[in-house]
Image (cartoon, rainbow, N blue to C red):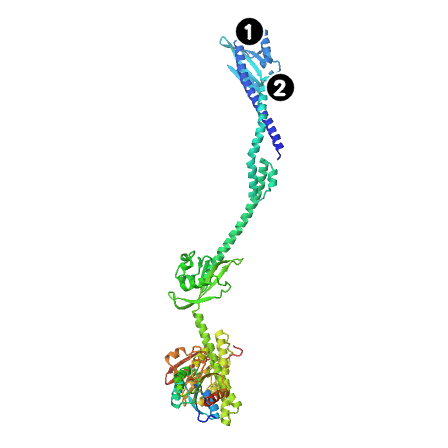
Amino acid sequence: MGNNKKILVIDDDAQIRRVVELKLKNRGYEVLMAMNGQEGVSLIKSQQPDAVVTDIVMPKLDGQTLCKQTNPLKKQRPFLTIVMTNRISPDDRNWVKDMQDTELMEKPFSPTRLLGCIDEYFRRSES
Amino acid sequence: MKVQRIGVLLIVLCLISISIVSTTLIRYEERKRARDMVDKGRYLVSLIALHSIKDFQGEKRSFFLRTLHDYISSEGLAYCLMHDHAGELFVSLDPYGLVSDIPQDVQLRSLHMTGLTHQTFHTNHPEGTIYEFAKSVFEDGQQAGIIRLGLRLLPVSLFSMERIGLLATIAFFIFAMVPFVFFGVKLALRPLKKLGLKIENMAGKPASAKEGKKKAPAVDDLIISLDRSLGLLRKKYKELETANIALEAKKGVVCYEKKQITQILDAVQYGITITDTQENVTHMNAHMLNLVNKELGDVVNRPLSEVLDHEAILTFVAQQEGVNQAATQRHIETTFPAVAPGETFQVALSYLSDKDGSITGKVISVKNVTTQKSVDKAKHEFVAHVAHELRAPLTTIKSYNEMLMDGEIRDLETQKEFYNTINQETDRLARLIENLLNMSKIEMGSLTIDRGLIKTDAFVKDCVAAIEAPAQKKHIAVEKKLPDKWPSLVGDKELLEVAMINVLGNAVKYSPDDSTITLSLREADHTIIFDVMDQGYGISEEDLNHIFDSFYRSSDPHISEQTGSGLGLAMTSEIIRLHSGHIEVQSTPGQGTHFSIRLPREDYQLGKQ
């Protein structure tokens, strides 16, 4: 499983990027990484990943703006976005509700649960 | 007093009146008789003196004596003496033997005076007062002799026939007046009795109707009532006087307390407006007067709506009418843009009540909550920031640990890397908690310095060791410029290490890979100086002004990309200050930063804290 699937991890924390990268690579996914939102948007547009794991609080461009900018792209080519944040606020739930194929995940997170969430999305989209 | 007693009293009064009238009559009669006596005596002695002395010595003597003798009882003649020119007594008619009692001076005056003399003297005889008349008898121009007559006053009889009639008439009228006077007095005393009862009532003694009926109007009753009432009034007066003194004292206390309360109200940093139930302002403290820009005299006893030109507050107060009064916690937030632009005020309404719980007024308090709101905001931001900072290492620890537990990391090198990361993040978490506790202690003023002798070689070694791992990770070289002779330092080793590691850690964190950090130690002018220089991104001029503020985080991407609590340098500066030292910073963006920590050199004494 995981073959041919490209996943983009966007986080300013190198340790988080590292652990997510290892978990996804172990499953066989191809992993791309970005250190901030701006870099992330650029990679989404150029690399067309199948899933995006992004932090909210980031330099240059935050996760919410990233989602808003990339959400229109999903109409032509849907992809999953998992937004990771330290604390899910009602405000976060509101804006995420309007985004296509977007889910929230609270930190500290479980890499296994993150992987499960991605696997589940691909399973559903393939069936 | 009973009615009979008044009757007896009136009878006694009548008898006394009769006695007085009778006595007055007798006195009048006596005076009249005395006047008559004088006239009679003058006449008699003058009449006798018309005769020649010789007539009384010769044949006429016996006739003369007989005539005079008749006068003794009828006209009151007491004696008759005749002296010749030599003063020899030749006629002495003295039926009562009074001549021997005539005083010497009376006798001498009668014998030696010329003309008619009239003298009075008293004797011990029953005849009482004697009137002596004397006159010289002249013959041929020569004094031939002296005639002396003594007359006595005849007793006045009260009950002579002519007077009995008069007395009976007077007595009749007096007795006839008794009943009129009796009823007159009774009528006259009626209002007095009423007055007496009223006085008693006034004095505080309630008179029963029965008692009032039984009592007859009488002067002595009135006097007793007056006396009793006066006693009660005096007692009442004393009680009132005591109460008045107590009231005056209370008034003084109340005035003092009122003044105190006014001062206290003026001292509080709330605007306070007190109104009565009709919403007329009864008091406004100084703070509130400033907000409405008015004087106390302009607001007292005036309607709140006229005094307070603030629609939001007036609406709020009006809305509270009829609302459950226990809900005094209700409040609104508003502004006074004209007086305090940009500031926020919280308005609350509470009620004043008396002992029975009846509402007596309202209290409108206006509190400036601008600072409180900004403190609340800062507190909220602080909690969010701390939570974020705590979650970051926890996220790493949890995810790395799970990877290891799930056997996802198979090669030993990566396993070691993961264990190291978990260890570093645990240390980071511990440091963060330690920093938070220290900051809390610093803010509470309870951070204590455990002074001791610090060997600077060991101190520098420990501090450098703490940043070695992250420095190596970024290939940052740590260059040390140390003296040959290590100075000793007095202070709290743990706290100073926290301060030094914060500065060195920042140098590592905000320096690019493959750069160099220089740590130097030197001693100058009894001061130990640590210099930390890096080749990092540098700090902007704006950030330099806030670099030691708690929770300040620069917006510079090079800095904000790195994890940080915003507590490190704030705490470092406090620790250095507590050691009587100071910290300086110089920085050029793009070139690097130079931190300089200066601590006073102290001679360590055992036991000194």
Identify which residue, B190 or B66, lies in the foreground: B190
Q: Position of residue B512 (x, y in %)?
A: 40, 88
Residue B149 colored in magenta in the image: no
Task: From this view, report whether residue B254 is shown above or below residue A2.
Answer: above
Q: Position of residue B38 (x, y in %)?
A: 53, 16
Disc 2 element = loop
Q: Position of residue B351 (x, y in %)?
A: 49, 61
Residue B331, visible in the rendered structure: yes
Q: Which residue is mark 2?
A: B126
Q: Which mark is residue B147?
A: none
The magenta segment is B53-60
Residue B458, visible in the rendered structure: no
Identify which residue, B295 or B380, lies in the foreground: B380
Identify which residue, B203 or B40, lies in the foreground: B203
Indicate the chain on which mark 1 is placed: B
Which of pointers 2 and 1 indicates the residue nearer the eye? 2
User: Looking at the rendering, which quadrant does residue A10 occupy?
Assistant: bottom left
Disc 1 element = helix
Identify which residue, B111 or B362, lies in the foreground: B362
Task: From this view, report whether residue B93 is shown above or below residue B224.
Answer: above
Q: Mark 2 vs mark 1: tell me if same chain.
A: yes
Task: From this view, report whether residue B372 is shown above or below residue B418.
Answer: above
Indicate the chain on which mark 2 is placed: B
Amino acid under label 2?
Pro
Within-10-Å neighbours for mark 2: few <14, some 14–19, many 20+: few
